[in-house]
Amino acid sequence: MAEQEKAEKPAKPEQTPMQRALPGLLVAGSLGGVGIVMVSLLSLVAPQAEDSSGTLAAAKTEPTKVEVVNAGAFVLAETVGPGGENVPLTAARPEASPPLAAAPFVSPFTPAKTKTAKAKVKPIRIKIPKIKVNAPIGAVGMTKGKLGVPPLSKPGLTGWYNSAPLPGDIGPAIINGHVSTRQGPAVFQRLRELAKGDQIYVYRSDKKVARFTVSGIEQAGKKAFPTSRVYGSTNDSQLRLITCGGVFSSKDHHYSDNIIVYATLSKKKG
């Protein structure tokens, strides 16, 4: 009976190679699907970058140039930078020295022999061809450790710190000016455009003319002003130009930073 039943069962059709391989393919497909899902999830988590063809690709491990610049935005430079077109201005480290001269030094003017004679000599005009500055120079002093500035009512006037050396004499001469007033741009509105190698001319009341060559420029926070680098004594004739920069506070009517230009005497007349 058993044999009869066995004989009556229909014979199984012979399986094709594809049919025999189908279970394995289904398992592989399932595993592959899991892999695809995992890759997709990782791609959502990983940062994406657009390649040159316009398609998205996984971000490279090496930072881009922009990332490198941004990464160093809060790291003070070892030296004062040269400035230049499209070059962001940053502050140098507090202990950094003034930048090296961009042109050979020339010896300072011979100072007047008496105090009376010295008192009569003053800087009277400054010219900076690159940024079209041709401005008179007044005098400013220091009050409670704060350097004075020209009157806001005279946006075209610059101010020489009259306790510092004369421009062209030995030591650092200091001249400042406003970047803007409520009436609009002021005398040093374009000062940040200066760069290493640019020329500055200072005319004096004794008919002497001092030509300075820019050696560097920086933007420093007013709360971290590089006092030693700006006012520190030097063995040659140097010049510092100062104006405001950074973020303007409409509440306090002040800028957050200072733009500082460093220059050295490179030619003299008179």
Image (tube, rainbow, N blue to C red):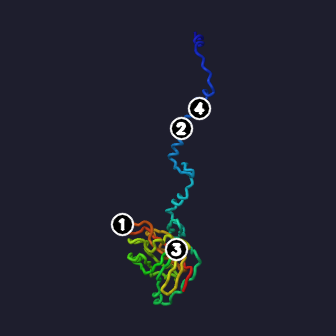
> Residue 25 — which label?
4
CB within 8 Å, label 1 to label 2: no
> Is disc 4 placed on a helix, strand or loop?
helix
Q: Secondary structure at mark 1?
A: loop
Q: Nearer the viewer, residue 56 or 159?
A: 56
The label number, if any, that marks residue 251 in the structure image: 1
Q: Secondary structure at mark 2?
A: helix
Q: Are marks 1 and 4 in contact (CB under 8 Å)?
A: no
- Labelled pair 2, 4 in contact (Cβ < 8 Å): no
Q: CA distance from mark 1 to mark 2?
A: 59 Å
Horizontal side of residue 247 vs 48, given as left or right? left
Among numbered discs 1 and 4, the one appearing first in the sequence: 4
Q: Is residue 21 above or below residue 77?
A: above
CA separation in Å, label 1 and label 4: 72 Å
Q: CA distance from mark 3 to mark 2?
A: 65 Å
Judging by the rendered image, the residue that carries numbered circle 3 is 130
Mark 2, residue position: 34
Identity, as a three-letter code, of the amino acid under mark 3: Lys
